[in-house]
Amino acid sequence: MGKYEDSYRHKGLRKKLMDQLREKGITDEAVLDAMNNIPRHFFLDSALDEIAYEDRAFPIGEKQTISQPYTVAYQTQLLMIKPQDKVLEIGTGSVYQASVLAEMGAKVFTIERQKKLFEKTKNFFLKQKYPNLKFFYGDGYEGLPTYAPFDKVIITAAAPFIPPRLIEQLKVGGLMVIPLDEGAHQRMLRITHNADGTVGEEAFENFSFVPMLSGRKG
Ligand code: SAH
């Protein structure tokens, strides 16, 4: 079977996965709809085709992973995406999370620090489908000052601290979802940028991410 074939079997497995996500506490149907529309097996090595709809992370090369569907759903739900939201994502990886955001109608700006992973996005197979998704090679700690401010910021790697540049690039009233490093696990935080310049913080579940590293890797 060709890699880019979305069979009834795949669709069925995907629907089951959405049910599992609901059971685990995901309630935002817009998020589940978007994930149900995206063939996750397209983002993985074809050897993983059969297990692409298990709720787990998988290797994508360069010591990186495609996040677990539950994690993607959880972070996206916390972002409260509205169509036309300008969203900055740190850690493009497999482009799966960015595609979910694009599918929801957001204008997505995603940054990857690893050249090899960034180069792969040049042939991204859903490029035509998502003209609202733009790829950048750079250091996520710097953000994208040229395109700022953003309504939402999502970090998909374990951040040792809240990157100050990214707060600067967040609109007043905007939201940032960030897994903050606490040793082996990260605490999922939602940061709000208040009108008086202060920053609010809500804490959620613990997750496990690959580290957010500084600088670009050629
Ligand atoms: N959102 C991705 C998850 C990728 S894993 C997906 O849906 O598949 C995290 C990614 O963050 C890796 O590709 C890693 O190279 C990248 N990363 C780590 N530190 C970064 C930084 N400072 N700037 C940009 N990307 C970074």
Image (tube, grey):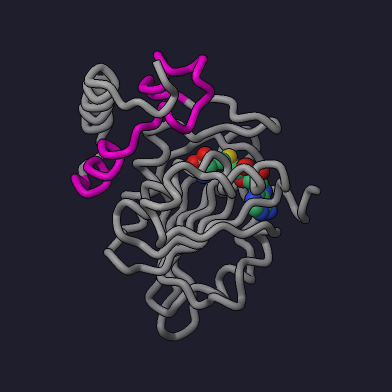
- Of residues 166 and 14, the one nearer the viewer is 14
Residue 15 relative to residue 192: left or right: left
Q: Nearer the viewer, residue 7 or 28?
A: 7
Is residue 44 shown above or below 85? above
On the rendered structure, is 63 left or right of 36?
right
**Residue drawn at (53%, 47%) of the image:** 156
Magenta region, residue range: 28-56
Q: Is residue 201 visible?
A: no
Name which residue lies at 22% across and 33% down.
22
| Magenta: main secondary structure | helix
Residue 77 is at least partly visible in this image = yes
Q: Residue at x 42, y 37 (%)?
A: 71
Quarter of the rendering containing residue 102: bottom left
Name the spot of residue 79 as percent of width and height, x first. 36, 57
Ligand 1: which quarter? top right
**Residue 163 at x, y = what percent?**
63, 63
Q: Is residue 202 above or below residue 99?
A: below
| Number of on-image labels | 0
Image quadrant holding the N terminus, namely top left
In the rendered image, residue 87, in percent from the top left (x then y), is placed at: 44, 64
Say which residue appears at 67% left-offset and 61% top-offset.
Answer: 141
**Does the magenta run of residues contain 49?**
yes
Q: Is residue 46 above or below residue 178?
A: above
Q: Is residue 18 magenta?
A: no
Q: Position of residue 148 (x, y in %)?
A: 53, 76
| Direction bottom: furthest residue | 196
